[in-house]
Image (cartoon, rainbow, N blue to C red):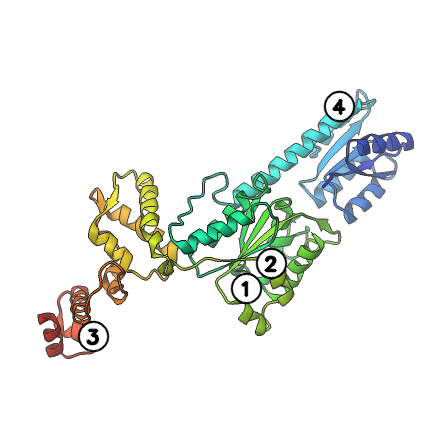
Amino acid sequence: MSHRILIAEDEAISRKHLIYALEKEGYEVTGATDGLEAFALFDQNTYDVVIADIKMPGMDGLTLLDKIKDKDPDMDVIIITGFGSIESAVEAMRKGASEYVTKPFNLDELNLKIAKVLKKKGIERENTALKITLGIGQEFPFIAKSRTMQRVVEVIRSITGSDCNVLLTGESGVGKGLVAKIIHHSSARKEKPFLALNCAIFTEELLASELFGHEKGAFTGAVSTKKGLLEVADSGTLFLDEIAEMSPTVQAKLLKVIEDREFIRVGGTRPIRVDVRFIAATNQNLTAIIKEGKFREDLYYRLNVMDIYIPPLRERREDIVPLSKHFLQKYAKKENKKITSFNKDAMETLMSYGFPGNVRELENIIERAVILEKNRSIHAESLPQTIKLFNVETISPNKLRTIEELNREYAERILDFVDQNRSKAAELLGISRTSLWRILKR
């Protein structure tokens, strides 16, 4: 997509010469005869750079610079000033001009300054993205020992050459955010911004502002123009987590962006064109929500060009051991501890647990265990009490036990939980003290 330049120059010959020269360089150029016309064009269209002569009738270059900066503080303006008028150049730079050139200027010099400004703009946009996104530029450890996760990897590999939108489904904590990053960094957009937005944590008004940005004065508190994530993510990827929580109004606006590749800031009037790949995620059944009228079917099909389901951890237990070892290595290094393994009881406890919070819960458990552990291996005592108390309710694939053994182990854990108070244990179990005694005696 070619860069758009607006030129404000009252001298017709100079203006036509500039337009011709810059169009030969591949830029999309618009000319204005004075500052008033230039600002009117700027107010209705999107430009990457404005080049303005400092002396013009009606509205001079410095006034135009002030009005542009008031409208969009991030806009790059190059000022053209007369030879020897260094005071004007200094004043322009003080007011926020990115560069200046003096008449008569060399076209090669102007081209170099335009290229410099555009390069700086691109770096700043990507730096903005880096501040918003966690993990950019890092390796992405992806544990896929289980067959189900290997299938996910196969799908990701199959779309590396595609630019299609992707819908990630699966329970909370299964790793949808990580998969989104891997998809982006495996694509042709990998050098461009990757931004993530959780739709569930914003009100409708704030979500619209975060996505589309807003103009100064668009609502109470909008003291300056703000670029939305769609604008910052231009040429990159935008990851929309918890997409089912998006209101119907914002859904309609997002659909228009996907279809038309343009949007209008909140409180704005001019369309802004963008080139963004969308990856959406949800832990809900979107088909059911569509039937309830809470999610647009047309938006669903626009996002669901490729659907990737990420299974819960309890359905891929082969991944528990390698994931646990990965998180152990990560947090042992972070906490500066020489813990290198899990003892047998600790690993059996982890393998027997159901992990309702999936991989995110496993990571939190390992981090906690590393902090508490005083030995060179993780012991079961360093794992949360809730896991040790209730893991007996699930079946370990490594050690099948009889009903009597399960009942006795569960009763013993309840006793530990209530400090060996048998009356309290029997009450919690819903049995008599005599029945509890019989279970423990077996």
Which amino acid is tagged 3?
Leu
For the residues labelled 2 and 3, say whether their Cβ atoms are less than 8 Å apart.
Answer: no
What residue sits right under mark 2 in the picture?
303
Q: Residues within 10 Å of mark 4 (few under 14, many from 20)?
A: few
Q: Please name which of the two marks, 2 or 4, marks the residue nearer to the observer.
A: 2
Asked which secondary structure carries label 2, the reply is helix
Which amino acid is tagged 2?
Leu
What residue sits right under mark 1 in the picture?
244
Compared across the picture, whether 399 is left or right of 14 comes to: left
Q: Earlier in the sequence, mark 2 or mark 4?
A: 4
Instruction: Using the numbered discs, state the Cα–Cα distance from disc 2 to disc 3 in whole angstroms.
Output: 49 Å
Q: Is residue 53 visible?
A: no
Instruction: Using the numbered discs, state the Cα–Cα distance from disc 1 to disc 2 in whole angstroms.
Output: 12 Å
Residue in view at x 15 percent, y 66 percent? 412
Q: Is residue 439 visible?
A: yes
Up/down of 68 relative to 286, above or below:
above
- In the image, residue 173 lies at what x, y percent? 42, 57
Residue in view at x 65 percent, y 57 percent? 219
Instruction: Using the numbered discs, state the Cα–Cα distance from disc 4 to disc 1 in whole angstroms.
Output: 51 Å
Q: Earlier in the sequence, mark 1 or mark 2?
A: 1
Between 433 and 441, the one nearer to me in the picture:
441
Which amino acid is tagged 4?
Glu
